[in-house]
Image (cartoon, rainbow, N blue to C red):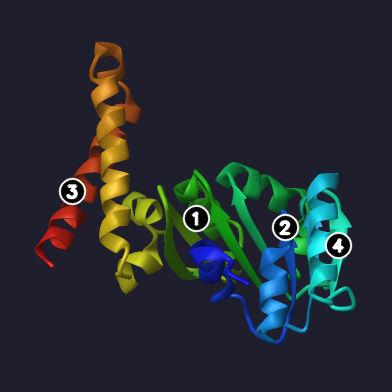
């Protein structure tokens, strides 16, 4: 089974020989792939919608894994009992939605040994929330598929010193590791902030706002990393 660069990067961060919950599983490609590779003991594939749950059941049955992967329909972590899974994957949603899922099920979230999140947007806010709410950023990865560059964040229970705004923006572990796609990541962030600032510059009121100043500072920080990447 070919699951693509995004799911492979997520799979690489899953702790081996564990029970993992895949929240928003869609077709259950991730847990099926992990089971096929012998990397996990069992999985719970969950989705809020009936259609994806049916598709997951079909896919799991096709690979003969009904005794290893259970499909549950429900919202977020509410499908789990505390301690039922060693870790969870929440991928393909907005950062604020991921935060909402975690805040809605604190009794379950606090029993997880690891959490892998892949926000489609809002990664800086998600990182900041995690570090302020009992999670440590253990690892980060980047994955690229046509027209998309994905940020993947592995969280574990614990604490770490607060990060700067630019570190939350880029990703502290990505800054440390400088993976092959790091330059592309910086370019993407820089281009996005440059567009927003250009748009805000059309309004004198916007230029006087605190948000405009904050974005200018972030753009300046990103420019420094951009120059570093250009030199390598």
Label whose residue precedes the other's in the sequence (3 or 2) = 2
Q: Residues within 10 Å of mark 2 (few under 14, many from 20)?
A: many
Q: Mark 2 and mark 1: span between their CA atoms?
A: 22 Å
Q: Which residue is mark 3?
A: 223
Q: Which residue is mark 2?
A: 25
Q: In the drawing, does residue 214 fall left or right of residue 121?
A: left
Name the residue rendered at 39%, 68% in the picture. Answer: 173
| Number of marks in picture | 4
Tell whether label 2 touches label 4 (CB within 8 Å): yes
Q: Which residue is mark 4?
A: 71
Q: Mark 1 and mark 4: span between their CA atoms?
A: 29 Å
Q: Which residue is mark 1?
A: 127
Name the residue rendered at 63%, 67% in the picture. Answer: 115
Quick check: 176 above or below 184?
below
Tell me residue 75's x, y (percent): 81, 48
Label whose residue precedes the other's in the sequence (2 or 1) = 2
């Amino acid at each position: 089974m070919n699951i693509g660069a995004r799911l492979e990067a997520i799979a690489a961060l899953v702790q081996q020989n564990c029970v993992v919950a895949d929240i928003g599983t869609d077709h259950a490609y991730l847990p099926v792939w992990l089971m096929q590779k012998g990397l996990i003991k069992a999985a719970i594939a969950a989705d809020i919608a009936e259609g994806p749950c049916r598709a997951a059941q079909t896919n799991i049955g096709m690979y003969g894994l009904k005794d290893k992967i259970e499909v549950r329909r429900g919202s977020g972590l509410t499908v789990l009992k505390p301690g039922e899974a060693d870790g969870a994957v929440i991928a393909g949603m907005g950062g604020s939605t991921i935060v909402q899922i975690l805040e809605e099920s604190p009794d379950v979230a606090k029993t997880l040994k690891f959490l892998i999140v892949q926000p489609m947007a809002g990664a800086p806010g998600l990182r900041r929330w995690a570090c302020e709410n009992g999670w440590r950023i253990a690892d980060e990865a980047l994955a690229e598929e046509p027209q998309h560059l994905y940020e993947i964040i592995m969280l574990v229970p614990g604490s770490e010193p607060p990060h700067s705004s630019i570190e939350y923006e880029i990703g502290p572990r990505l800054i440390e590791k400088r993976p092959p796609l790091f330059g592309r990541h910086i370019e993407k962030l820089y281009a996005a902030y440059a567009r927003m600032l250009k748009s805000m510059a059309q309004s004198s009121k916007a230029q006087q706002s605190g948000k405009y100043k904050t974005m200018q500072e972030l753009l300046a920080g990103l420019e420094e990393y951009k120059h570093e990447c250009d030199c390598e």
